[in-house]
Each structure stands twice: as C-alpha cells, then as structure tokens.
C-alpha cells in the first residue's frame, strides 16, 4: 500500500508494507504516469489517487499522532506555502494556510541556496531579518543587499531570519512551535526561529502520518 | 406595452423604494448587480479591488442598453465602494437613484436559521430584497455558522452542512436592517463559525476581529475559490 504527500517541489512516498519512506522530486514522480497512490495529500497528489486528503487535515491528524501535549501549535513550511494548526485540549482551535503573502518562500530559499552555493548548515544566523512579504519581494531585498556590497551569505541569512519571523507571526506567536517540512533540516532557519520561541522539529513526514490511522 | 428592461440594484435598498420603482415599471425585472454574471471586464476598476463592486460596474456596463435605471445603495448599509461605483456609473450616463437604507427595526429571521442548504438560504435571503419572504421554514439547531456577505464564488457555501446558521450582513438583509452593526456583529457563541469577507473589502477587519473573539475561522477570497480556502473550510468543519 502506497501513501504519498506530493508537495510542489518534493514528494514523500511511504510503502506501508515495508515502512520505507522515499523522498523524490515531485517532477520525477509526475513523469512516471503509471505511479498511483492508495491515499495521497499535497497539491499534486490529487490526480494520482482515489482517496485524497486535504493537507490541513493530514497535518492536523499527523500532529495529533506525533505530539502528546494537550495544547500545541504545528507549522508546516512547504516550497509554495505555509500552514499551521493549533490545538487546545487536543481539540482544533485555529488553523490557517497562506498561499498569498509569504508564499513561495521555501522554493525561493532552495533556488537562492543553489545559485549562491550556500550550505544552510554552516550559515550563521543574521541579527536582522529581511522583510519577507513574498518570495519575489524577498529576492529583490536580497539582490539589493548584495548590490550594496554585502556578502551573499549575510543577505541570505537575513532572508532566512525573515522567513522565521514570518512563520512565527503567522502561527500566532506561540511560546513553543513544532515545525514540519523540509525546513526542519535547515539549521540556520531553526536557529533563527529559536530567537522567538522554543522550536521542536518534527521532520518531513508529518502529513504522511496523518494519512493513516 | 413598453419595452421590458432591467432595474439594476446594488446592496439592499429600502423596501419602500424597491416597491415604488416596481409599481412604476411593472413590466421590468429587478436584477442584482452585485452578483457575478460573467460580464466582460469594463476596464474601469483596478485589478486589486473588491470583486463585488467590480461586478456592479462590469455588470452595469455590460447591460447598459437593457438597464432602465440603477437603484444604488450608497450608505452605511453598503460601503464606500458602492458609493464610488454609483458616482462613476452616473458619470457614464446611467440613470442612478441613490438610496440609503436606514431601517432600524429588525424583522424576525427565519431563513438564516432554517435547515435549507446554506447556498439556498443565502440565495433566498438575497431574493427577499426584491420579493418579501412569505413562506415559513423549518428551523434547525446550528452546528456551524457562516458570517459575512454573499461570496463572489457562491460554491463556497456548498461546503457547509444544512445545519449552518447565517450571521453577519446576510442576516441583516433578511432582518431588513442592512446597516445594523449590532445585528451584524451577532453570532451564537460556541458555534464554530466561518467569518468571511470579500478580499479588499473593509469588512475584513470586522471578520478577522470577530473570528479571533469567537474562536472562529477567518477567511477572505477574491475571485474563484482557491485550494487553500477550500482546505481551511473543510478542515474547520470536519475537525472543529
């Protein structure tokens, strides 16, 4: 039995028979037209399954499976969007999904890191954030900083800090924030976010967890 | 027999004005200019603007030769956008009758709290602007609430169960007091409610504030429904 979370850039695919999870570029998954899933979530999973689950519900259910607290907030940062769910007494209290302002930030981050050859594991946290209204505005801010003579590393670290601040505000400024998605592997992002709240990374498979009982 | 034409209106004009215009033009048909009619863009409205007011202008320009006149709500019962739309349309040569609905005595509501599907509730309520409600409806206890104005993309309303009660401006329309801010703010506390406003509408601040106050879900939408809005509403209804 195959389940999948097909995001805009990356697809997380789990074979429930052997428990193995693979993470593949979504473009590669889309090229294989024969590949179908028993259950799927994510923007691009809808056409590949007869049992589609909406991403917020997958995030909410996956979070309840992975977190024992009664009150908690989880944010999932994807390539294209950011979403969060907040629980009180393990009952859903707040949720939101941002596809407009603050959108495409994960994608922009990946793009810029490749372009400048920057490893986020080694990147020091910037003291000040670049305002991140959206990916496009952020690129403008980064290029502006570089044109003024600053190193690309500093500009990118400020951008990462900007994303972290945006995420914190978007999730309603909780004391502790559980983080889901690819940015869990981004040390610079987690350290930037840590300046605002306690940070608990959950990894990339939270939505997958929410697809099964 | 005179040529049959449309009498356009926006917002919720006073009943007395609708009736007097209806008597004067008995063969004409009322048409709600707020509603999406697939009219081509008039090019008169900025891209980033309230879709409902955009509908008003685009519909009027599209229907121009078939419109006898436009009854334009321009008071607190509508919005500045309605007032400016009326001004522009008058400038373009449309016969405009400006009205302000200042009714303060709320009539009892029955459709808002009925067990009809939400889309039908909203359509029937908006129909009462031209034709007063005569029928009675079976009532239902609310499991959910929908607060706000009729969305540009009405398919949003199909996502809700029939046990959804209507609040906000739509309820004010049914009560015939579209400028009654006290009624507009009313919701049943404890009922999971979606607070909706059209993107770029001033009501967003109220929707957001009330959603925060009542632990509801605040959403805004511009044109057609987006994947994220659908997902938020679905998740809120299923898990809230």
Image: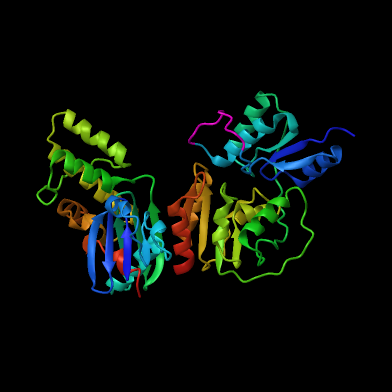
Q: Is residue B46 on the magenta stretch? A: yes
At a point 26% along the width and 48% down the height, the residue shown is A106
Give coordinates of residue A37: x percent, y percent: 35, 64
Q: Which residues are magenta?
A: B39-48
Q: Is residue B237 above or below residue B51?
A: below
Give coordinates of residue A31: x percent, y percent: 31, 51
Q: Is residue B46 above or below residue B130?
A: above
At a point 57% along the width and 32% down the height, the residue shown is B41
Answer yes or no: is residue A175 visible: no
Give coordinates of residue B180: x percent, y percent: 64, 51
Q: Is residue B12 above or below residue A24?
A: above
Magenta stretch: dominant SS? loop
Q: Is residue B104 left or right of residue A198?
A: right
| Residue lying furthest front | A34
Q: Is residue B16 left or right of residue B82?
A: right
Q: Is residue B118 left or right of residue A122?
A: right
Give coordinates of residue B102: x percent, y percent: 70, 45
- For the C terminus of chain A, the quadrant is bottom left
Q: Is residue A184 left or right of residue B232?
A: left
At a point 66% along the width and 43% down the height, the residue shown is B11
Closer to us: B130 or B161: B161
Closer to us: A66 or A127: A66
| Res A20 → quadrant | bottom left
| Res A108 → quadrant | top left
Q: Is residue B15 on the magenta stretch? A: no
């Amino acid at each position: 039995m195959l389940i999948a979370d097909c995001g805009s850039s990356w697809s997380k695919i789990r074979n429930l028979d052997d428990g193995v999870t693979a993470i593949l570029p979504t473009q590669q998954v889309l090229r294989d037209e024969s590949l179908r899933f028993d259950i799927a979530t994510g923007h691009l999973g809808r056409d590949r399954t007869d049992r589609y689950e909406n991403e917020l519900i997958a995030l909410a259910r996956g979070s309840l499976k992975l977190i024992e607290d009664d009150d908690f907030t989880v944010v999932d940062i994807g390539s294209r969007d950011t979403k969060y769910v907040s629980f009180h007494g393990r009952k859903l209290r707040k949720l939101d999904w941002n596809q407009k302002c603050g959108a495409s930030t994960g994608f922009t981050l990946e793009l810029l890191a490749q372009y400048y050859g920057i490893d986020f594991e080694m990147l020091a946290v910037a003291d000040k954030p670049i305002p991140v209204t959206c990916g496009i505005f952020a690129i403008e801010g980064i290029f502006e900083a570089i044109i003024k003579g600053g190193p690309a590393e500093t500009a990118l670290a400020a951008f990462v800090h900007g994303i972290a601040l945006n995420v914190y505000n978007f999730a309603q400024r909780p004391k502790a924030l559980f983080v889901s998605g690819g940015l869990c592997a981004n040390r610079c992002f987690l350290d930037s976010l840590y300046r605002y709240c306690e940070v608990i990374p959950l990894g990339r498979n939270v939505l997958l967890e929410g697809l099964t009982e | 027999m005179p040529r049959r034409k449309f009498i356009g209106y926006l917002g919720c004009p006073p009943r007395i004005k609708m009736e007097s215009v209806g008597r004067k033009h008995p063969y004409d048909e009322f048409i709600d200019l707020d509603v999406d009619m697939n009219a081509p863009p008039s090019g008169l409205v900025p891209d980033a603007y309230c879709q409902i007011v955009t509908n008003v202008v685009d519909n009027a320009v599209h229907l121009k030769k078939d419109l006898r006149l436009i009854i334009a709500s321009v008071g607190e019962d509508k919005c500045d956008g309605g007032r400016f739309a009326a001004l522009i349309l008058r400038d373009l040569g449309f016969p405009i009758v400006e009205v302000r609905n200042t009714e303060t005595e709320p009539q009892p509501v029955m459709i808002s709290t009925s067990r009809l599907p939400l889309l039908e509730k909203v359509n029937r309520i908006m129909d009462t602007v031209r034709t007063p409600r005569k029928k009675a409806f079976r009532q239902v206890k609310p499991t959910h609430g929908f607060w706000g104005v009729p969305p540009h993309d009405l398919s949003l309303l199909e996502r809700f169960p029939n046990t959804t009660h209507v609040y906000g401006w739509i309820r004010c329309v049914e009560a015939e007091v579209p400028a009654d801010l006290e009624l507009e703010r009313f919701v049943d506390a404890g009922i999971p409610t979606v607070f909706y406003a059209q993107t770029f509408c001033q009501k967003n601040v109220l929707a957001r504030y009330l959603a925060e106050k009542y632990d509801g879900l605040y959403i805004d939408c511009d044109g057609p429904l987006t994947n994220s809005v659908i997902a938020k509403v679905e998740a809120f209804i299923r898990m809230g």
